[in-house]
Image (cartoon, grey):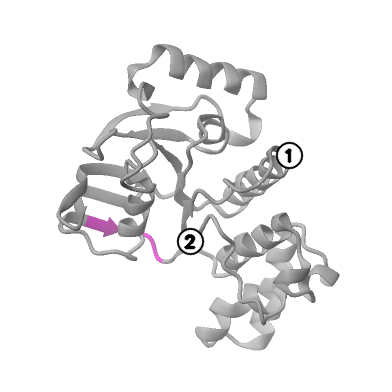
Amino acid sequence: MKTGLTLKGLRHAYLGRTVLDHIDLEVPASEIVALVGPSGSGKSTLVHLAADLLTPIGGRVERNYKRHAMIFQEPRLLPWATAAENIVYPLRISGTSRREARARLKSVAAKVALLPDDLEKYPGELSGGMRQRCAIARALIVAPDFIYFDEPFTALDVALKRRMQDLVIAATQSSSFGGIFVTHDLMEAARIAHRVAVLDVGGGGIVGERLVPGTPSMRDDAELFALSQRWIREDTVFRHIHDVDERMSG
């Protein structure tokens, strides 16, 4: 299977303090890998390094995909632009024709269930869920073959979080992209990802990986809940995922 992303011996530090060390991870081109770990273990830092938003102090990042996109915890929409203008912004700065941009906008808006009236509104007029739909659409509109998800649904309530998860699952199936999905919610990881990678409590590497049975769109919630509870109770790889290190975020 073609590899979309490879991290080899990745290292990073802040103000002399090592936060990630000896990180090795491979993500196939059409697979979503959920990254979990204790708060402060460097999950977000790892994603920012992989996405070229930060420069590692050691190791290598091999990006074998053509184009990536990123979805953050906050939608990060331009407040003075409409939803439509926010979504097509990456196309506008890349010089895509208006005709092509309109066609792509119509396609991605349908995928995330945004209506024409929604597209004419400004971010301040949209609910939190609608703003996050815009952020997902903005990522999809560039037709990426790899997406980084940095805890995108943490601030949403349970029902809304589930709807956003369903959007990601459906988009993954229809567009066949790979990606890393950072989350602190093990049930969310098991629901969305093909594989779960667990970061060491001190950022000292990937302590283990676990395959999630079945395909994301066909999984039973009761079975996923039982699986996540079994991981927490019986699997030593997940022993520290709820620990907190207040010196670092992610």
Residue plotted at (25% across, 40% down): 203
Decide whether residue 46 is among the magenta residues.
Answer: no
**Where residue 12 sits in the image (x, y, percent)?**
21, 53
Residue plotted at (31% across, 44% down): 26
Front residue of this view, candidates 89 and 218: 89
Residue plotted at (50% across, 37% down): 193
Element under label 1?
helix
The label on residue 159 is 1
Residue at which label 2 appears: 70
Name the kind of residue labelled 2 in the image.
Met
Distance from label 1 to label 2 (Cα)?
Answer: 23 Å
Q: Is residue 75 visible?
A: yes
Task: Classify 10 Å Cα crowding around label 1: few (below 14), some (14-19), many (20 and above).
Answer: few
**Where residue 154 sits in the image (x, y, percent)?**
57, 45
Residue plotted at (58% across, 33% down): 191
The label on residue 137 is none
The magenta segment = 61-66
Q: Within the image, what quadrant is residue 91 found in? A: bottom right
Name the kind of residue labelled 1 in the image.
Ala
Front residue of this view, candidates 41 and 138: 41
Left or right, 77 with respect to 248, comes to: right
Check the image and name the residue furthest to the front: 246
**Where residue 97 sits in the image (x, y, percent)?**
61, 88
Left or right, 104 with respect to 228, comes to: right
Element under label 2?
strand
Left or right, 23 with respect to 117, comes to: left
- Circle nearer the viewer, 1 or 2: 1
Q: Within the image, what quadrant is residue 214 found in? A: top right
**Where residue 63 sits in the image (x, y, percent)?**
31, 59
**Quadrant of the frame with the N terminus:** top left
> Disc 1 or 2, which lies upstream in sequence?
2
Q: In this view, does 184 lie above or below 233?
A: below
